[in-house]
Image (cartoon, rainbow, N blue to C red):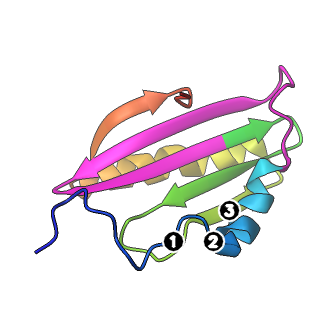
Amino acid sequence: MNEPFDNDPDLDLDEDKWADEFAAFEDFDTENDNVRLRTAILQKENMVALLCIKSAPVGAAICRVDPREPLPAVQLYDDPHAALHWFTRSLRTSKVNGWNVVYDGLPLEG
């Protein structure tokens, strides 16, 4: 039986297989004052998930890391207002489905 925080030997975080998934998400310039970042950390039973949005005046991206999925999912939007709408809707749906929001704010670093 695995403990909840044991390393999964099948999950190699050093592989480049995730590079394509995050390439578009990292294209926004984080030094720009017009870029908005928001990260939500969700918890349900012994699972942790992330929902992030990065937006600028010209577009936005939502990234979802779901422990039940093999890879993160990134959705790009031309309209930052539409992205915020879908981010908020996804967060609300997650709460209805039993997920607890343990953090919602600026990305944590360090």
Lateral position of residue 49 relative to residue 15, left or right: left
Task: Report which residue position mark 1 lands on.
Answer: 12
Going from N to C along the chain, the mark reached first, 3 or 2, is 2
Label 1 to label 2: alpha-carbon separation: 6 Å
On the image, the x and y values in percent for residue 94 come to 34, 54
Lateral position of residue 95 relative to residue 31, left or right: left
Q: Residue at x 56, y 31 (%)?
A: 107
Q: In this picture, which residue range is highlighted in magenta?
A: 27-53
Lateral position of residue 8 relative to residue 64, left or right: left
Judge depth for marks 1 and 3 and give the one in front. 1
Q: Residue at x 50, y 49 (%)?
A: 51
Helix or strand or loop: what does disc 1 sit on? loop
Q: Residue at x 69, y 71 (%)?
A: 16
Residue 82 visible in the current orientation: yes
Compare residues 14 and 32 and report the one nearer the observer: 14
Packing grade of label 1 (10 A; few <14, some 14-19, many >=20) is few
